Amino acid sequence: MVTLTKRLPHHQIWMKHLNSKKQPALSIKNLTKVYDDSFQALKGIDLDVAQGDFFALLGPNGAGKSTTIGIICSLVRKTSGSVTIFGHDIDEDFSTAKQYVGVVPQEFNFNQFEKPIDILVAQAGYFGIVAKVALERAEKYLKQLGLWERRNDLSRNLSGGMKRRLMIARALIHEPRLLVLDEPTAGVDIELRRSMWEFLKEINQQGTTIILTTHYLEEAESLCRNIAIIDHGTIVKNTSIKALLKQLNRETFIFDTRQELSSCPVITDYPVTLVDNHSIEIEVLKTQSINEVFVALSDQNIDVISMRNKSNRLEELFFDMVEKNLSAKTVGQNDE
Amino acid sequence: MNNYQKWVAFDTILRRELRRFMRIWPQTLLPPVITIILYFVIFGQLIGARIGTMSGLPYIQFVAPGLIMMSVITNSYSNVVSSFFGSKFQRNIEELLVSPTPNWIILLGYVAGGMCRGLGVGAIVTVLSLYFADFSIHSLPITIAIVLMTSLMFSLAGLINAIFAASFDDISIIPTFVLTPLTYLGGVFYSIDLLSDFWRNLSMINPVLYMVNAFRYGIAGITDINIFWSFGMVGLFSMVLFFSALRLLENGSRLRS
């Protein structure tokens, strides 16, 4: 009897663990948000983010990205719908749900008159972490993010990039299972952006689920496995980056030529645009071959000295989708 | 969050508040001390010497409890209102809002910070007043109880002001146009027995009058009104303010979009 009663809780714990593995890190169901001025920012979105994922939430300004993030970290009150974090509802079990989330907002939101070390230790305290442990973690994250030497400076004296890294360290201080970053690399130089990417990849590999909003689509393409595109408060696409890129049926290449071009060369079936005297843009469909382009240019005695993609592939898709969504809405409005 | 974690969160807020007002002591601790010394010199020694006695006490002994209470009230209030509004303005209040810290802990943390400053300045002013006036304590429990309750009440009021405030103007309007008149007309400098019936009855709706009189009773043993009324009024106001402030935090009024 004693053995049985001992086994049962273990079994339940094991089942719970198994279930918790299956649960998405974030599950949003029919989420709506109407602000006081009657602006409807979210129109019933559904979104699941799997545990361990590196997920991008993309959308133009005012699409509803920050509202969604605000609701996840309880800075914005939802109008209806539900949000669960690792199976814990943010309304019914807010304490546990909040323990799982770390958030890096878009705007600097720390006390500019405090020292980075004090900001981190205080943030840990708000999560019930004692000062000794908080100091150890603060040292770890400040060192990893290159801020340890500036730990006792006033935060307002830090550079923009340092302030952004300070917010990442603050979001990690309670070691959340889900890290939400709202445009974390906005205004950060390329070198620092790359080092932040490496850092984020590392913590994702260690098991932290990451949700990212960004305007740098290259960032989403290099970091994320899955993506949702949000526009006018609705999710217009929710798929993997790979699947999304497969939908891209054309790419634009820029060819730099050795000779000076007096006119735009003509290549049958390939739209060509003259950019300047030494470069042309050529659109190539996935069903076509780029070799044909080289042959055609060679036939016209044009030597190509270099070639590159005109823009980020994801960017082209993103604009296509947002434009399509906008046209659909305009048509819908006209119908009304 | 378990109870220990809640305690850690409370302790963190309180320490942060203490660090804040200690760091800017020339703005938070020094001015009230200088102001109160000027009150003692002008009202107590220069003018007070010509006034003689008030309610049977030398004037300086009459005003000393009122001046101590005035410093407790203004400092408790202004600490919470400026700290909480500052956090709202810089948006670092979001650090607390995204954490699992319950709203009642946030409330207690800020209020405890306000009380620490109010009582700290009150203690400094009390020590300074001994240089200007001789007085003994009539009832220590009453003195301590009323000063604690008053500090609590005005810290809560400061928090509510900060929640509603949308600009720095909003945090100075209440202290300037409400708190200062209530304090000056709350029996700090005179006994309400000197007033005509109309003004005397009007004074009875001023909550500061009850606090100042209860505190004066604790120190000097004299009061214009029944001190049980004083405790009842302060207790009632504190409860109303506590639950109002908690409700505002729970609703996220002016804190969450």
Image: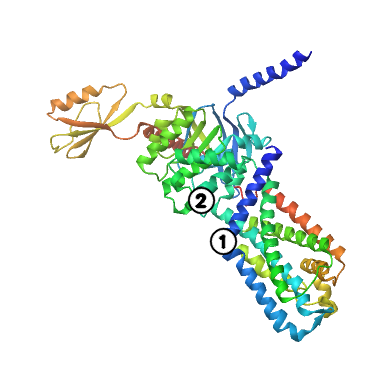
Q: Which residue has dot 1 on it? A: B24
Q: Quadrant of residue B130?
A: bottom right
* Residue plotted at (57% across, 65% down): B26
Q: Relative to residue A12, is residue A154 depicted above or below?
A: below
Mark 2 surroundings: few (<14), some (14-19) or many (≥20) residues within 10 A = some
Chain ID at mark 2: A
What's under tag 1, amino acid-wise?
Ile
Relative image position of residue B183 (x, y in whole percent): 73, 70
* Residue plotted at (65% across, 22% down): A16
Residue B202 makes an appearance in the image: yes
Relative image position of residue B104 (x, y in whole percent): 70, 47
Measured Cα–Cα span from mark 2 to mark 1: 15 Å
Q: Quadrant of residue B241?
A: bottom right
Q: Quadrant of the N terminus of chain B?
A: top right
Of all residues, the one furthest to the bottom in this rendering is B50
Q: Which residue has dot 2 on it? A: A115
* Residue B181 image label: none
Chain ID at mark 1: B
Q: Secondary structure at mark 1?
A: loop
Q: Relative to residue A244, is residue B31 depicted above or below?
A: below
Q: Secondary structure at mark 2?
A: loop
**Left or right of residue A55, residue B53 in this image:** right
**Left or right of residue A298, residue B243 in this image:** right
Relative image position of residue B239 (x, y in whole percent): 78, 54
* Residue plotted at (61% across, 45% down): B97
